[in-house]
Structure formats: C-alpha cells, structure tokens
Image (spheres, rainbow, N blue to C red):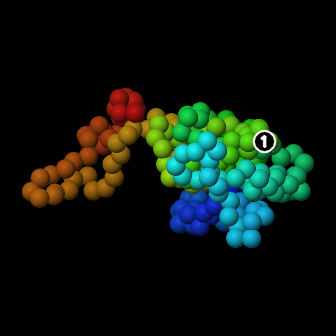
C-alpha cells in the first residue's frame, strides 16, 4: 500500500511515522508514504498558495491549482510504478462520510494507493473536486485545524489491515473477541494501601467463561 499525502506541513507527520508499528511497516516496505507540498507547485515567487475567499469571510482559502498539480504529480508516480495501480483520493471534511474500521478494511482490499488531501485555514478551493473524483471523509463530528491529524488516523487504521504490518494478523482487535479492559502481571499490586487484582475469571483457565467475560466488555 502506498500513501500519498498532499499537505502544506509534511513535517507534522515526522514523529508519528518514525515510531513503533508504522515506522517498522515503512522499513519493511509493507507501506510507503510520500509527500507533495502544494507550495512546490505554486507559480507565485514567494510560493504563496492562499488567497481571500470570494464573497468575503474570515480566513484564507488554499488555491486550487497548486493542489491539483500536486495530486497530478502523485498520479503520475502511480502510473510509472505500476499499470495495475488502483488509487483512491480522500478529501478530508467535517461533513464527509464517517470513517470507520470497516471503511479501512474495504479500502485496504480494493486499492493499492491512497491520496490524502489535507486542508488548512478556511479550506481548499472546491474546484479541486471538480477536476478529480474524490471522496469527502470525516474522522469525527468535530472541526480540526487541518487535515494532517485525520490523515494520520486513516493511514494508521488502513495500514493495520495490510498483512505483515502488525506481524501477527491475530493482533487485529477488530477481528477477534477483545475486551475494552485488559490486564497483565502482576496479579495483584498495592497502591496507597489498596490492593488491585486481576479479575478471577481471567485466571480460571476456563476459555468459555473468559470469552463470555470479554463479550460483555466489548
């Protein structure tokens, strides 16, 4: 799976992509992440890509052409690498389709490449969506400063569905009976004079009862 991220702030991804599971997945070439900064495709001498919105209003709007050129560059790289590429273009929007684990599973099975369009300020000129077939996606009923955090959320969830990324496919909580509460050693610990114990059922060895306990806490 190849992820292509259109963003004005590619460094915002550094800490997340360089740690833990995602970092290993990149090193093992299970996934690849590429960045395309609209500023690199601006005709403005100062690489400015934002302008005031038509009809007035606060804030600035990212111009369509630099974003369009960045997306076009990503699509060109797809064609060079593989004639069998299947790309999906995601445009992050608070009013978009709600992102879910099921959405991530279907996306991982169907596509080889995902292009994320990360907005900022008051958003991106909507004509970008007239040039390319995009899907508006939301990671929740709230507004964020930009599309970078949603891109990380979707990248993480989709990457987990790719064989080899988690090492053991059984680690996928969503594909097995998993409780929202988990415990590990020691069996008992003391904190400020009070003892905290692991539920007895988890120590019983009775798999049926353990599964029932987990189901009640999903």
What residue lies at 87% left-to-right and 45% top-to-bottom?
84
Q: Position of residue 75 (x, y in %)?
A: 82, 51
Quadrant into which the C terminus falls: top left
Along the viewing direction, whichever of 10 and 119 lies nearer the viewer: 119
| Residue 30 seen from this side | no
Residue that protrudes farthest toward the left in the picture? 193
How many numbered discs?
1
Q: Residue at x 9, y 57 (%)?
A: 193
Taking the image as shown, residue 154 lies to the left or right of residue 88, namely left
Residue 128 appears in the figure: yes
Q: Of residues 25 and 101, which is closer to you in this image?
A: 101
| Left or right for 41, reference 210 | right
> Which residue does the image show at 56% across and 35% down from the upper left?
95
User: Regarding mark 1 in the picture, which secondary structure is present there?
Assistant: loop
Residue under pointer 1? 132
Image coordinates of residue 194 in percent, x first then y, are: 12, 53
Q: Is residue 197 left or right of residue 183?
A: left
Q: Quadrant of residue 214?
A: top left
Label 1 Cα crowd, 10 Å radius (few <14 / some 14-19 / many 20+): few
Please, is residue 157 above or below residue 7 in the view? above
In depth, the one of 81 and 194 nearer the eye is: 81
Q: Position of residue 142 (x, y in %)?
A: 46, 41
Q: Residue furthest front?
A: 55
Q: Residue 144, relative to residue 109: is it above or below?
A: below
Looking at the rendering, which quadrant does residue 40 occupy? bottom right
Say which residue appears at 68% left-offset and 59% top-offset: 49
Name the side, left or right, on which 3 lies relative to 94: right
Q: Residue 17, percent across and down?
A: 58, 62
Q: Residue furthest bottom?
A: 45
């Amino acid at each position: 799976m190849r992820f292509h991220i259109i963003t004005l702030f590619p460094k915002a991804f550094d800490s997340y992509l360089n740690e833990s599971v995602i970092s290993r997945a990149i090193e093992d070439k299970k996934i690849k992440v590429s960045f395309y900064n609209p500023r690199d495709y601006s005709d403005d001498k100062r690489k400015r890509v934002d302008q005031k919105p038509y009809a007035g209003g606060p804030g600035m709007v990212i111009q369509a052409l630099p974003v369009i050129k960045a997306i076009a560059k990503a699509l060109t790289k797809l064609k060079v690498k593989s004639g069998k590429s299947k790309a999906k273009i995601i445009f992050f929007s608070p009013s978009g389709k709600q992102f879910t684990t099921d959405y991530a599973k279907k996306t991982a099975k169907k596509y080889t490449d995902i292009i994320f369009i990360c907005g900022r300020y008051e958003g991106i000129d909507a004509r970008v969506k007239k040039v390319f077939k995009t899907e508006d996606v939301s990671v929740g009923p709230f507004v964020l400063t930009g599309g970078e955090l949603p891109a990380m959320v979707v990248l993480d969830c989709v990457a987990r569905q790719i064989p080899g990324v988690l090492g053991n496919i059984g680690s996928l909580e969503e594909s097995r009976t998993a409780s929202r509460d988990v415990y590990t050693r020691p069996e008992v610990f003391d904190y400020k004079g009070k003892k905290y114990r692991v539920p007895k059922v988890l120590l019983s060895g009775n798999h049926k009862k353990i599964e029932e306990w987990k189901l009640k806490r999903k």
